């Protein structure tokens, strides 16, 4: 029974490995969500574009949280060390009235350090999960939308549009005959 499950799982993974969309996955590996956005052909109403924007926003939020919690952790580590040094100096001087207050402050700073450390690991995990999801989604599940031609609809007979790529008049030339 386990062999059949393993073989079917392996077959499914091999099938996905050869039918994926490598350019989209590469774009999502560079900037999370970019593969989905480019598959959506820039149309904001496209599901691919919305999914890509969601991945990009989630990754940015988690990356910000991770960097913020790393900064907090370092700050609390420094604060914990300062209180540990003060406790050590106070014990040498023999002043017991301040020692209880210093111990309380040290414990509070250490608890804050542990909390910031936990949030750092949470945000690192979430950031990595969103990054990995973006690549896997772009590779396996995202198909490019059909590109739509943008036109002006019915053009009047006296309006002339032309594109020039030579000489001084490069660009779009518009003329209207009265």
Image: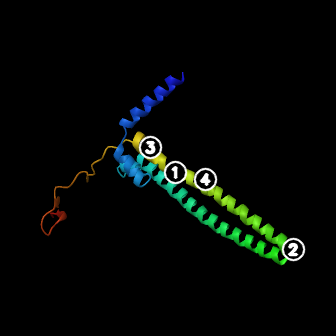
Instruction: Indicate which disc, 1 or 4, sits on the residue closer to the N terminus.
Output: 4
In the rendered structure, are the residues bearing label 2 and label 4 in contact, judged by CB atoms less than 8 Å apart?
A: no
Report the number of discs: 4
Q: Residues within 10 Å of mark 1 (few under 14, many from 20)?
A: some
Going from N to C along the chain, the mark reached first, 3 or 4, is 4
Identify the mark at residue 128; answer none if there is no mark: 1
CA–CA distance in space, label 1 to label 4: 10 Å
Q: Residues within 10 Å of mark 4 (few under 14, many from 20)?
A: some
Residue farthest front in this picture: 92
Marks 2 and 4, how far apart at CA = 39 Å
Residue at the spot x=34%, y=47% of the render?
23
Q: Earlier in the sequence, mark 3 or mark 2?
A: 2
For the residue pair 128 and 47, the one nearer the viewer reads as: 128
Is residue 37 shown to the viewer in this render? no
The quarter in which the N terminus is drawn is: top right
Q: Position of residue 14 (x, y in %)?
A: 40, 33
Q: Residue at x 50, y 58 (%)?
A: 60
Q: Is residue 139 visible?
A: yes
Q: Which residue is mark 3?
A: 136
The residue that disc 4 covers is 122
Residue 154, position as x, y percentages in the image: 23, 51
């Amino acid at each position: 029974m386990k062999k059949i499950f393993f073989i079917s799982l392996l077959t499914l993974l091999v099938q996905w490995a050869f039918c994926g969309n490598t350019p989209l996955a590469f774009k999502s590996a560079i900037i999370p969500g970019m593969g989905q956005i480019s598959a959506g052909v820039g149309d904001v109403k496209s599901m691919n574009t919305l999914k890509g924007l969601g991945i990009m926003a989630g990754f940015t939020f988690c990356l910000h949280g991770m960097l913020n919690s790393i900064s907090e952790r370092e700050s609390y580590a420094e604060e914990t060390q300062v209180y540990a040094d003060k406790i050590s100096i106070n014990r040498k001087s023999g002043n017991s009235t301040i020692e209880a207050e210093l111990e309380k402050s040290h414990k509070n700073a250490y608890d804050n350090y542990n909390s910031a450390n936990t949030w750092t690991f949470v945000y690192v995990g979430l950031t990595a999960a969103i990054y990995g999801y973006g690549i896997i989604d772009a590779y396996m599940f995202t198909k490019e939308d059909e590109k739509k031609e943008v036109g002006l609809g019915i053009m009047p007979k006296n309006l002339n549009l032309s594109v020039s790529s030579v000489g001084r008049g490069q660009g779009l030339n518009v003329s209207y005959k009265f």
